[in-house]
Amino acid sequence: MVLGSALLLLCLACLARASDVLELTDSDFATRVAEHDIILVEFFAPWCGHCKRLAPEYEAAATILKDNDPPVSLAKVDCIEGGKESCGKYGVSGYPTLKIFRNGEMSADYKGPREKDGIVKYMQKQVGPSAKEMTAVEDMKKFIDNFDVSVVGFFAQEDDLHKAFMKTADKLRESFRFAYSTAAEVLDEYDYRSAIVVFQPPRLHSKLDDPKIRYPGKEDAPSFEEWLKKNFAGLVGHMTKDNEALYSVFMPLVVVYYDVDYVKNPSGTNYWRNRVLKVAKEFKGKKISFAIAQKSDYSRELQEFGLAESNEDVVVGIRGRGGAKYRMEEKFSVGTFKTFVETFLDDGLVSYVKSEPVPESNDGPVKVVVGKTFDEIVKDKTKDVLIEFYAPWCGHCKSLEPKYNELGEKLKSDPNIVIAKMDATANDSPSSYGVQGFPTLYWAPMGNKENPKKYEGGREVSDFISFLKKEATHPPVIEGGEKKKKKKKKEDL
């Protein structure tokens, strides 16, 4: 009996133990977050399955990180009950969303793993100074003489530029290497007193490009952050799998793919890069950016450009706005490359579209769309179009197929509505028709082809028809009408 009571008390004590994850609400969010130099906040919904799976990992990470040196706190906010305003303020649109706060201000989105060890390692990297202080010339030279770009601040005093530098370093510490100095000998050596300078790594030094770029803008963090993201790469950056997210701001971006290897073959790598630099220098100041990349790391992207089967040592593609892609057909040389870029800037290139062959016959109730006919069918301004993006191997797509075909049969006489489908694994579509999973359906009405509406309704024929009755520009013409439920005959008593 005594043993049973002891066990009961022990269990109750375990249940009563406070969670190591702080619970925040709208009433105390700002004050409690401001109490921490750094804190990771999870914005969640109680019904969210991903949140439920994250919960034990998040709790375990919080227990470990509270004893870290220095400690790191983890918190959570219920976006449905007590934290609606906070979730709205920070633009939370999906669950769970995790954000890092420093000294009360949102610093960066959390982009790390969602399991215990990964959370711990990611957040441990977030503590400590985001910018290394250099007090000796030798230390600064070692920092700059690195494989990656160095972002360095030189400050004779803690002015507004210094504040902007430190705030940006806190926010972008995962993407860039930051260092600064206030030491007189360092400032004298580099001849800067109040400046931020981006130093290119020695492997990328060339007579065709300045190895250092000084920030010329306003003394505020947003201006410096925007400038840094657009200028860190110099005239021709080296895009890798580790830094490719940084290149998303460069649009249009010319990428030259070849055997880029600065470890085993730096001279051969720069042989081709110098030729790219020679052309890029002629377009300096124009709204176009340049990068080199290792062919073997970007086989999937080369497939998207239709260049995967090319036997050329050097191939070129341009990422345009709106997801458009352009590829160079000619063999690479300084002359052909320059002409290719000039033609692009003069709007003389036709974008490359990945496409299956155009069907010889397309008279079925569900129209087959391929990359080459997307504009013709889906963007036809005289038609409302419901289009399904599918994958041949997708089980849900196969389940939907007979219902979608039935819908097509019912609408085949309607002169204003097109029911269509496209194999999204074999054909390109505009970026406004984003596909993250299969099947994905979009509604493209007559008057708004560039801003289609994602279909989120049910997948029964009756659900589609109800949607069409509500959204169609003209009343739908439904062949055979809708099936009505038969009324049971009353039996005589």
Image (cartoon, rainbow, N blue to C red):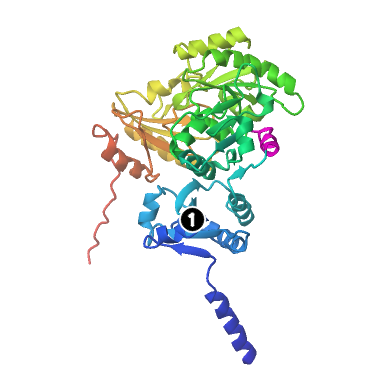
Q: Which residues lie in the magenta part?
A: 137-148
Q: Quadrant of residue 211?
A: top right
Furthest toward the bottom, the residue is: 1
Image position of 469 (left or right of 367): left
Image position of 240 (left or right of 226): right
Quadrant of the rendering where the C terminus is positioned:
bottom left
Q: Is residue 57 above or below residue 469?
A: below
Taking the spot 54% from the left edge, 60% from the top edge, the residue there is: 73
Say which element carries label 1: strand
Taking the spot 73% from the left edge, 19% from the top edge, the residue there is: 268
- Residue 57: x and y in percent read 58, 59
Q: Is the magenta stretch mostly helix, strand or loop?
A: helix
- Residue 145: x and y in percent read 69, 32
Furthest toward the right, the residue is: 264
Amino acid, disc 1? Glu
**Does 147 appear in magenta?**
yes
Q: Is residue 272 above or below residue 402?
A: above
Quadrant of the rendering where the N terminus is positioned:
bottom right
- Residue 357: x and y in percent read 51, 20
Q: Quadrant of residue 210?
A: top right
| Circle 1 residue | 42
